[in-house]
Image (cartoon, rainbow, N blue to C red):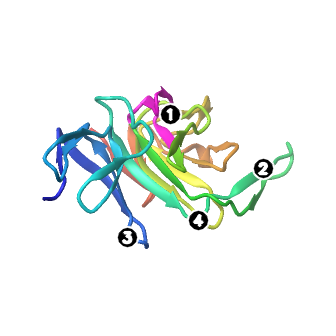
Amino acid sequence: MKAQIILFAIIAMMRLSNGTVYVGGDFSSYIASNGSRIFVSAIGELLTSDILQLGDGVDLQKQVSAISYLPQAPRCDRNCSSTQACLVTCVPGSDPALFIGGSFTIANGAEMYRISRITNGSMLETDKGVSNTVYSVQAHETSGIVYYGGAFLDATGVPVGSVTSWDGKNWDQMGGGVSFPSTCDASGTQPVRRG
Protein backbone atom coordinates (compact mmCIF):
# COMPACT_ATOMS: atom_id res chain seq x y z
CA MET A 1 0.00 0.00 0.00
CA LYS A 2 1.30 3.47 -0.91
CA ALA A 3 1.05 6.48 1.43
CA GLN A 4 -2.01 8.62 0.77
CA ILE A 5 -2.01 12.34 1.48
CA ILE A 6 -5.27 13.47 3.02
CA LEU A 7 -6.64 16.89 3.88
CA PHE A 8 -5.79 19.05 0.88
CA ALA A 9 -2.88 18.79 -1.56
CA ILE A 10 0.77 18.65 -2.54
CA ILE A 11 1.69 22.02 -4.08
CA ALA A 12 5.48 21.75 -4.45
CA MET A 13 7.72 18.78 -5.18
CA MET A 14 11.45 18.40 -5.76
CA ARG A 15 13.30 15.26 -6.83
CA LEU A 16 17.05 15.14 -6.28
CA SER A 17 19.50 13.26 -8.52
CA ASN A 18 19.89 10.59 -5.80
CA GLY A 19 16.15 9.84 -5.96
CA THR A 20 15.14 11.66 -2.77
CA VAL A 21 11.78 13.39 -3.19
CA TYR A 22 10.61 16.30 -1.04
CA VAL A 23 6.97 17.41 -0.97
CA GLY A 24 5.38 20.56 0.36
CA GLY A 25 1.82 21.74 0.35
CA ASP A 26 -1.38 22.23 2.20
CA PHE A 27 -1.62 18.96 4.14
CA SER A 28 -1.50 17.94 7.76
CA SER A 29 -1.56 14.15 7.64
CA TYR A 30 -1.48 11.05 5.48
CA ILE A 31 -2.54 7.42 5.65
CA ALA A 32 0.63 5.34 6.13
CA SER A 33 1.34 2.00 4.45
CA ASN A 34 0.15 0.22 7.61
CA GLY A 35 -3.22 2.04 7.46
CA SER A 36 -2.61 4.42 10.37
CA ARG A 37 -3.05 8.19 10.12
CA ILE A 38 0.27 10.04 10.53
CA PHE A 39 0.47 13.79 11.15
CA VAL A 40 2.93 15.64 8.90
CA SER A 41 2.62 19.40 8.69
CA ALA A 42 3.08 20.69 5.11
CA ILE A 43 6.69 19.56 4.41
CA GLY A 44 8.26 16.12 4.22
CA GLU A 45 10.49 13.61 2.48
CA LEU A 46 8.55 11.11 0.39
CA LEU A 47 9.76 7.60 1.13
CA THR A 48 8.77 4.41 -0.68
CA SER A 49 5.60 3.97 1.33
CA ASP A 50 5.57 6.81 3.88
CA ILE A 51 6.36 10.50 4.40
CA LEU A 52 9.04 11.61 6.85
CA GLN A 53 8.25 15.01 8.37
CA LEU A 54 11.07 17.55 8.22
CA GLY A 55 11.59 19.31 11.53
CA ASP A 56 8.29 20.03 13.28
CA GLY A 57 6.66 21.24 10.05
CA VAL A 58 4.81 24.54 9.72
CA ASP A 59 1.74 26.00 11.41
CA LEU A 60 -1.60 24.36 10.64
CA GLN A 61 -3.84 25.94 8.01
CA LYS A 62 -0.73 27.24 6.22
CA GLN A 63 1.21 25.83 3.30
CA VAL A 64 4.62 25.26 1.75
CA SER A 65 4.34 26.32 -1.90
CA ALA A 66 7.97 26.29 -3.06
CA ILE A 67 11.06 24.11 -2.51
CA SER A 68 14.67 24.41 -3.71
CA TYR A 69 17.85 22.53 -2.80
CA LEU A 70 21.59 23.16 -2.53
CA PRO A 71 23.77 20.04 -2.22
CA GLN A 72 26.39 22.04 -0.32
CA ALA A 73 25.08 25.39 0.81
CA PRO A 74 28.01 27.83 0.71
CA ARG A 75 28.92 30.23 3.49
CA CYS A 76 29.03 33.77 2.13
CA ASP A 77 30.48 37.11 3.24
CA ARG A 78 29.29 40.37 1.71
CA ASN A 79 31.43 43.51 1.76
CA CYS A 80 29.90 46.80 0.62
CA SER A 81 31.06 50.38 0.51
CA SER A 82 28.85 53.39 -0.08
CA THR A 83 30.51 54.19 -3.43
CA GLN A 84 31.10 50.72 -4.85
CA ALA A 85 29.08 47.65 -5.63
CA CYS A 86 28.95 44.89 -3.05
CA LEU A 87 31.42 42.04 -3.25
CA VAL A 88 30.08 38.67 -2.16
CA THR A 89 32.67 36.02 -1.35
CA CYS A 90 31.45 32.46 -0.86
CA VAL A 91 33.28 29.36 0.31
CA PRO A 92 31.87 25.85 -0.12
CA GLY A 93 29.74 24.63 2.74
CA SER A 94 29.62 21.11 4.04
CA ASP A 95 25.91 20.58 4.66
CA PRO A 96 23.11 20.29 2.11
CA ALA A 97 20.19 22.66 2.57
CA LEU A 98 16.56 22.65 1.50
CA PHE A 99 14.93 26.07 1.12
CA ILE A 100 11.17 26.40 1.46
CA GLY A 101 8.67 29.21 1.07
CA GLY A 102 4.93 29.56 1.54
CA SER A 103 2.29 31.22 3.68
CA PHE A 104 3.45 29.93 7.08
CA THR A 105 4.51 32.12 10.01
CA ILE A 106 5.55 29.29 12.35
CA ALA A 107 8.08 26.61 11.38
CA ASN A 108 9.63 24.09 13.73
CA GLY A 109 7.66 25.71 16.56
CA ALA A 110 9.31 29.12 16.12
CA GLU A 111 8.35 32.33 14.30
CA MET A 112 9.63 32.09 10.72
CA TYR A 113 7.91 34.39 8.30
CA ARG A 114 7.17 32.46 5.10
CA ILE A 115 10.70 31.13 4.44
CA SER A 116 12.97 28.59 6.09
CA ARG A 117 16.19 26.67 5.48
CA ILE A 118 16.28 23.01 6.46
CA THR A 119 19.72 21.59 7.28
CA ASN A 120 20.35 18.25 8.98
CA GLY A 121 16.63 17.89 9.71
CA SER A 122 16.37 21.26 11.51
CA MET A 123 14.28 24.15 10.21
CA LEU A 124 16.22 27.39 10.56
CA GLU A 125 15.22 31.04 10.31
CA THR A 126 16.32 33.07 7.28
CA ASP A 127 16.72 36.51 8.79
CA LYS A 128 13.20 37.69 9.72
CA GLY A 129 11.54 36.48 6.52
CA VAL A 130 9.21 38.27 4.10
CA SER A 131 5.92 40.15 4.52
CA ASN A 132 3.57 37.92 2.51
CA THR A 133 3.28 34.58 0.68
CA VAL A 134 6.24 33.08 -1.21
CA TYR A 135 5.29 31.24 -4.41
CA SER A 136 8.72 30.39 -5.77
CA VAL A 137 12.21 29.62 -4.45
CA GLN A 138 15.30 29.00 -6.56
CA ALA A 139 18.76 28.37 -5.08
CA HIS A 140 21.76 29.10 -7.31
CA GLU A 141 24.21 26.26 -6.71
CA THR A 142 27.45 28.07 -7.61
CA SER A 143 26.90 31.29 -5.65
CA GLY A 144 24.60 29.98 -2.93
CA ILE A 145 22.25 32.93 -3.49
CA VAL A 146 18.60 32.03 -2.96
CA TYR A 147 15.94 33.83 -5.02
CA TYR A 148 12.37 34.27 -3.75
CA GLY A 149 9.27 35.36 -5.67
CA GLY A 150 5.80 36.02 -4.33
CA ALA A 151 3.24 38.52 -3.11
CA PHE A 152 5.50 40.24 -0.56
CA LEU A 153 6.63 43.86 -0.47
CA ASP A 154 9.50 43.64 2.00
CA ALA A 155 12.09 41.23 3.36
CA THR A 156 13.02 41.97 6.97
CA GLY A 157 12.13 45.63 6.41
CA VAL A 158 13.96 45.99 3.07
CA PRO A 159 11.51 47.10 0.32
CA VAL A 160 11.73 44.43 -2.40
CA GLY A 161 8.58 44.45 -4.57
CA SER A 162 7.64 40.74 -4.95
CA VAL A 163 11.13 39.44 -5.83
CA THR A 164 14.34 39.33 -3.83
CA SER A 165 17.49 37.35 -3.24
CA TRP A 166 19.29 36.35 -0.03
CA ASP A 167 23.05 35.84 -0.02
CA GLY A 168 23.24 34.51 3.52
CA LYS A 169 23.59 37.97 5.08
CA ASN A 170 21.65 40.54 3.07
CA TRP A 171 18.50 40.97 0.99
CA ASP A 172 18.83 42.37 -2.54
CA GLN A 173 16.17 44.75 -3.86
CA MET A 174 16.84 43.46 -7.40
CA GLY A 175 16.21 46.80 -9.09
CA GLY A 176 13.06 47.52 -7.09
CA GLY A 177 11.19 44.33 -8.01
CA VAL A 178 7.92 44.26 -9.93
CA SER A 179 4.82 46.40 -9.52
CA PHE A 180 2.19 45.27 -7.05
CA PRO A 181 -0.40 43.58 -7.40
CA SER A 182 1.77 41.25 -9.47
CA THR A 183 3.68 38.38 -7.99
CA CYS A 184 6.90 37.00 -9.33
CA ASP A 185 7.78 33.38 -10.06
CA ALA A 186 11.50 33.27 -9.22
CA SER A 187 12.04 30.03 -11.14
CA GLY A 188 11.07 31.70 -14.40
CA THR A 189 11.28 35.35 -13.31
CA GLN A 190 8.00 36.13 -15.09
CA PRO A 191 5.49 38.39 -13.35
CA VAL A 192 2.12 36.73 -12.81
CA ARG A 193 -0.98 38.94 -12.60
CA ARG A 194 -3.21 38.08 -9.66
CA GLY A 195 -6.67 39.36 -10.01
Q: The disc labelled 1 sits on which kind of residue?
A: Leu
In the rendered image, which quarter is residue 129 located in?
top right
Front tag of 3 and 1: 3
Task: Answer yes or no: is residue 185 visible.
Answer: no
Are dots 1 and 4 in contact, CB under 8 Å? no
Which badge, 3 or 2, is on the more N-terminal residue? 3
* Residue depicted at x 66% and y 50%: 167
Label number found at residue 19: 3
Q: Nearer the viewer, residue 135 or 179?
A: 135
Q: Which residue is mark 2?
A: 78
Given this view, does label 1 or label 2 mark the residue nearer the observer?
Answer: 2
Residue 174 rendering spot, x and y as whole percentages = 60, 49
Q: Which range of residues does the magenta coloring cover?
A: 103-116
Rendered location of residue 149, percent (x, y): 46, 47
- Of the two numbered discs 3 and 2 in the rendering, the one whose residue sits closer to the viewer: 3
Q: Which residue is disc 1 drawn over?
A: 153
- Quarter containing the C terminus: top left
In this figure, which residue is indicated by the disc labeled 4? 141
The reply to whether the C-beta atoms of the residues labelled 3 and 2 are less than 8 Å apart is: no
Q: Tag 4's secondary structure?
A: loop
- Judge whether residue 107 is colored magenta: yes
Q: In whole angstroms, how far apart are the C-alphas of marks 1 and 4?
A: 26 Å
Q: Amino acid at mark 2?
A: Arg
Q: CA distance from mark 3 to mark 2?
A: 34 Å
Residue count near mark 4 (Cα–Cα under 10 Å), binned few <14, some 14–19, many ≥20: some
Dot 3 and dot 4 residues touching (CB under 8 Å): no
Mark in front: 1 vs 4: 4
Q: Position of residue 100 (x, y in %)?
A: 45, 47
Dot 2 crowding, Cα within 10 Å, few <14, some 14–19, many 20+? few
CB of mark 3 within 8 Å of CB of mark 1?
no
Query: First in sequence: mark 3 or mark 1?
Result: 3
